[in-house]
Each structure stands twice: as C-alpha cells, then as structure tokens.
Image (cartoon, rainbow, N blue to C red):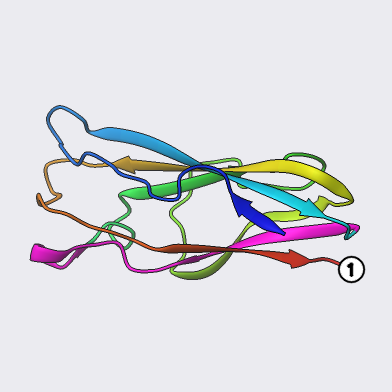
Amino acid sequence: MLSIESGDEVTFEVDPLNNPEDTAETELLVITNLPAYSITALFSDFVIEDFNYDLIENGKFFIRSKAPGSGEGISDWTVPKKGEMVVVKFEDGFTSGEIAVIEYMLKVDFSVPPGESKMKIVFTAVPEI
C-alpha cells in the first residue's frame, strides 16, 4: 500500500529576482507485509507552456529522497529523468506504516521565462524479493 500524505500538489513561485530557489516535499506513507520494497516515480514534462521551456531538460528542477529505514534514497540534489525513476531502493518492509520523503527544488535564474507550468508525478511501490 502506498499513500500520499502531503504534497499531492506542489506549487513553486518562479521569480528569479525575489525567489531564485524554492523547495517542497511529498511524504509517502507505506504499509506493507512484504520483506522489502522500492518506490518508483514517473515524471512527465515540466514545461512553461507559453515558451515551451522545459524545467527538467534545462536543469532547473531537482529531486532527492530519504528512505525511512535501511533502504537507499537519492542523497544529492539530482535532475530527474523523464519517465520512470527509482527514488527509494530496497527499503525493509514488514511495516505498519513508515514515511519516505521526496524533496523537490526549483532553482531559476534570468534565463528562465515567466509563466505557469505543471507536472504530474506518479509514485508506485514495487515489491523486492
């Protein structure tokens, strides 16, 4: 079972002058009777519509993750790959509830055009045997 506890919608203020860096996070509550699991994230486009400017392709959007136990997260800020990416690996299971944290950072400069952008991220818990 995978439940999103926070961050079902993440909003950033894109303003190179007053807010060149912004962060947010999503907490994923995992309840499982499996001995181990991993969590994947499926990233879509993150495009500023009016300018066709992709924040991921231009290296302006980053993620990192924290595994709640003995698993492995993403320790350094990393530009995510479009498509499916493992964000927590080989976390120990048999849990009545533990929280994995996925953090996001948007870092913009004056090369980033103004506008609105939305991205969908789909998280999936995967059994490890």
Residue 36 vertical position relative to residue 108 in the rendered view, above or below:
below
Residue position marked by numbered label 1 in the rendering: 129
- Amino acid identity at mark 1: Ile
Q: Quadrant of residue 53?
A: bottom left
Span of residues in magenta: 35-53
Q: Give the mark count.
A: 1
87 relative position to 67: left or right: left
Residue 55 in view: yes
Q: Quadrant of residue 119?
A: bottom left
- Identity of the residue furthest to the top in this view: 18
Between residue 110 and residue 122, name the one nearer to us.
122
**Residue pictured at 45% horizontal, 50% vertical:** 8
SS at mark 1 in the image: loop
Q: Check residue 47 for magenta coloring.
A: yes
Where residue 20 appears, as percent x and y from the top left, is 22, 33
**Residue pictured at 72% horizontal, 50% vertical:** 30
